[in-house]
Amino acid sequence: MTELSELFAEVAEDIQTSIRELGWHTPTTVQAKAIPLMRGGGDLIVQAQTGSGKTGAFGIPLVEGIDTSIARIQALVMLPTRELANQVAVELTTLGRHRGVLVLPVYGGTGYAEQVDALETGVHIIVGTPGRILDHLGNGRMDLRDVGALVLDEADEMLSLGFWPDMREIGTYLPEKRQSHLFSATIPEKVRSLSRFFLTDAEFVAVDDGLSAPQQIEHYYYVCSANEKEALLARILEFEDPESAIIFCNTKADVRFITGYLSKRGFNADQISGDLAQAARERALKRIKSGELRFLVATDVAARGIDISDLSHVISYATADAPEVYVHRTGRTGRAGKAGIAISLVSGLDIGNFKHMQNVNNIEVVERTPPSESDMLTRIRERIQVKVEHEMRGLSPAQTDFEVNRLIPVVEAMATSHEGRRDLAGICAAYLSEHRPETTVPEEPNADAPPPERRRGSSDGRRNGSGRGGNRGGGRGGNRGGGGGNRGGGRGRR
């Protein structure tokens, strides 16, 4: 029999068997850091990249804490996409196979019948996207009163896709006494605000060596040829979907060109430069401060004195002329303790100056690969799926199936011709631009406001639960007994 590491050897024997079947022998860094803390009973914020082994990090304690004698939902894992939900559900099913843990993936784009049947029969862990989860909750098909552990995986992506309103609503169905864990590749301010909504006294865990806390500003750059910059800029804006951004150019001619280029492609962009009349300049500034304008294209001189409190991105279309100019540009985001993202487009001729700027300013700027066509298609599809799930939520499964099935022949017929495909693409474009998703989480809950109304008897938390222990998950995360187990928690675009 394969020897397991000390950490894996501490878990229940049936889970050890599953770990061996998965080919795991030694825990990854995130598993070594997170598993003991989750088994100890506290809430966690974990900064970890995809592929770091984080599913095992939260999956082992989740599965270990399930009481299989009760066919009720005891853990909830939320993710941004159906592909991720299915992938995580498969891994959790493998981990819990020998324990008899029932895992149900719940996401849109598939029929309701199988999910409804499984919910009626009884499952232990739900893994799904917020939209379909809320759909089942709203129709009374899902009961979260026994949930003792909540995991928000890929939290930054869920927010960027506009899931915040759904997540907030799902929170009203959850018991107060539970453990909650947030996993995210990045920890911008909106993710920290999300953690304050769902988590209590959470401990921060960073996987990368030397990373002790999230940085206020994340710095990235893309290398491209000079004649590809405007196309790459448009691609990045579409992929990143920033709340708001200033795009810096070195010349007034570039400001005019980029503003026109973006506007012709449907981006909500305006400009300020020395050539602009004061009234037009003031209108542009007022629009971006109010949120009416998303992208402001400017020269460094024209942008002096601009103070925009909620600027999420700063993008350098042209490399800053001097190291101190880069600092001034990027300092316009990440203000008042909020997080921001600084992106630079660097041509081959400028790479030497750009590296010099990094050294002088002692700033680590990470190179990124431009999003591929496949990446772009995936991101657009995900946004459409989110909006469709939201729009269809008020319908019953029978109504949804009827509406969808009667239109499938229409879509298939339209897709057979170039003109029809253009019409379908136009429908998608109009649908996406109708309104942008709500991605901003309130910064701080109002201390004077009453707690959110709990639904379906969830306010009393787990039955017989007390403090962090709950009525399950004792000691180091076993199935029963008190004291810090995994079950239960203690809460007192364009």
Image (cartoon, helix red, strand yellow):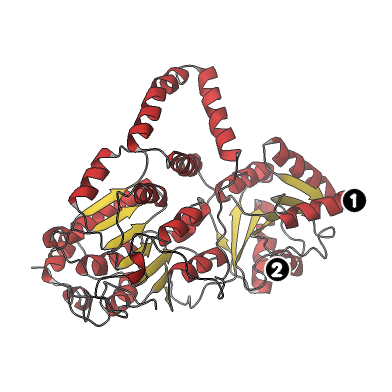
Crowding at dot 1, Cα within 10 Å, few <14 / some 14-19 / many 20+, comes out as: few
Is there any visible trace of residue 448 in the rendered image?
yes
Residue 181: horizontal and vertical position, in percent? Answer: 38, 68
Residue 289: horizontal and vertical position, in percent? Answer: 74, 57
Amino acid type at image mark 1:
Ala
* Residue at screen point 43% across, 17% down: 413
Q: Nearer the viewer, residue 199 or 376?
A: 199
Residue 407: horizontal and vertical position, in percent? Answer: 42, 24
> Does residue 423 lie above or below 297 as drawn?
above
**Contact, CB < 8 Å: mark 1 with mark 2?**
no
Q: Earlier in the sequence, mark 1 or mark 2?
A: 1
How many discs appear? 2
Q: Nearer the viewer, residue 222 or 285?
A: 285
Q: Which label lies toward us, 1 or 2?
A: 1
Residue under pointer 2: 331
Crowding at dot 2, Cα within 10 Å, few <14 / some 14-19 / many 20+, comes out as: some
Residue 204: horizontal and vertical position, in percent? Answer: 44, 76
Q: Nearer the viewer, residue 9 or 223?
A: 9
Q: Is residue 306 left or right of residue 389?
A: right
> Does residue 323 lie above or below 376 as drawn?
below
* Residue at screen point 39% across, 23% down: 406
Q: Quadrant of the N terminus?
A: bottom left
Q: Is residue 401 left or right of residue 394?
A: left
On the image, which quarter does residue 408 sit in? top left
* Residue at screen point 29% across, 49% down: 105
Provide the secondary structure element on which disc 1 rests.
helix
Amino acid type at image mark 2:
Gly
> Does residue 262 lie above or below 212 as drawn?
above
Say the numbered circle drawn on residue 279: 1
Is there any visible trace of residue 25 in the rendered image?
no
Q: Quadrant of the C terminus?
A: top right
